[in-house]
Image (cartoon, helix red, strand yellow):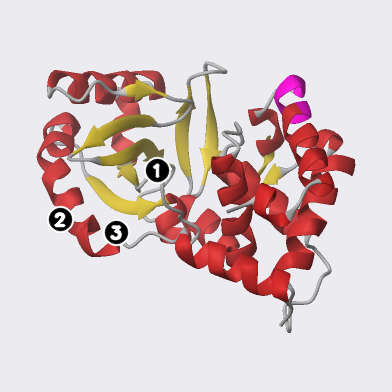
Amino acid sequence: MNENDQYIRNIVTAHTPNVTYIVADKINELKPHIHAWANGHAYTLKLSGSLAKGTAITGTTDIDLFISLDPSVSTCNTLENVYNTLRNRFNGAGYSAREQNVSLGIDHTGLKVDVVAGVRHQVLGLDHSIWKRKAQTWTKTNIDEHINHVKKSGRVSDIKAVKIWRKLHKLDFPSFYLELSVIEALKGIGLINSSPASNFVTVMNYLVTDFEDRIIKDPANQGNEVSDELTVTEKLKVKELAKATLAGNWNQAIW
């Protein structure tokens, strides 16, 4: 292993959080609010996002929760109403919920928590409809498929390195879009004896040359273009930072 590979591995290790031991307790503390909001409707609560995928890093969202509502909810609530009433419930409990695109962000006893509520298409199915606040419309998604897609990609460590880069440079780059972009950038590169440093450079080159125009689709819904989550201007910022990173030293890229 060369020096740059070891540097990347050390950085990823240093930025890997140790919060899994308290996650169950924190979820249990939020359950009464979620249960009251559900108002008798059947639901399940599951861990999603970076902790579930293994791509979590320190200093970003600590816990992502997905509320899977029974299909019967759609008979008496629009998806927009599901989103808004959940926000109101957290606000009423003193959380000052942040409206994000599909999620609500709250701060709970020192941890950042993102909560998404979706309505299952079928009682035993995994496909869900969720509200997209920015577009004022709904979209189909499958959180379980997202988790499996990332975990089975073999690119978890490479994704964490790019997430660290994003965090340190205060870059607006939605996590799932980032994860899929790293997987796309490294497509065709073998996993055996993979070089963390070489892979990081490959991703940066992809962000400079291909990212801006590449359409990235939701693996659980080909009709949903994840690449639409950033505007042309926002994508250009990603490209320019990647270009500057390639021109600099390793300790200026991630640290």
Name the residue at 84% across, 68% down.
188
Determine contact: label 2, label 3, CB under 8 Å. Answer: no
Please say whether residue 220 is visible from this viewpoint: no
Q: Position of residue 214 (x, y in %)?
A: 83, 40
Q: Which residue does the numbered mark 3 point to in the structure image?
A: 19
Span colored in magenta: 232-236
Is residue 234 within the magenta segment? yes
Number of other residues with Cα within 10 Å of mark 2, as a class: few under 14, some 14 to 19, many 20 or more: few
Q: Mark 2 or mark 3, which has the lower sequence index?
A: 3
Q: Nearer the viewer, residue 141 or 71?
A: 141
Determine contact: label 1, label 2, CB under 8 Å. Answer: no
* Front: mark 2 or 3: 3
State the SS at label 2.
Answer: helix
* CA distance separating discs 3 and 1: 11 Å
Q: Amino acid at mark 1?
A: Thr
Quadrant of the frame with the N terminus? bottom right
Q: Which mark is residue 206?
A: none
Number of other residues with Cα within 10 Å of mark 1, as a class: few under 14, some 14 to 19, many 20 or more: some
Q: Main secondary structure of the magenta part?
A: helix
Q: Mark 1 or mark 2, which has the lower sequence index?
A: 2
Q: Mark 3 or mark 1, which has the lower sequence index?
A: 3
Q: Position of residue 202 (x, y in %)?
A: 82, 58
State the SS at label 3.
Answer: loop
Name the residue at 84% across, 45% down.
247
Q: Which residue does the numbered mark 2 point to in the structure image?
A: 25
Please determine whether, in this image, residue 108 is positioned above or below residue 182.
Answer: above
Q: Nearer the viewer, residue 255 or 240?
A: 255
Q: Position of residue 105 (x, y in %)?
A: 34, 31
Q: Amino acid at mark 3?
A: Val
Name the residue at 63% across, 65% down.
8
Q: Which residue does the numbered mark 1 point to in the structure image?
A: 61
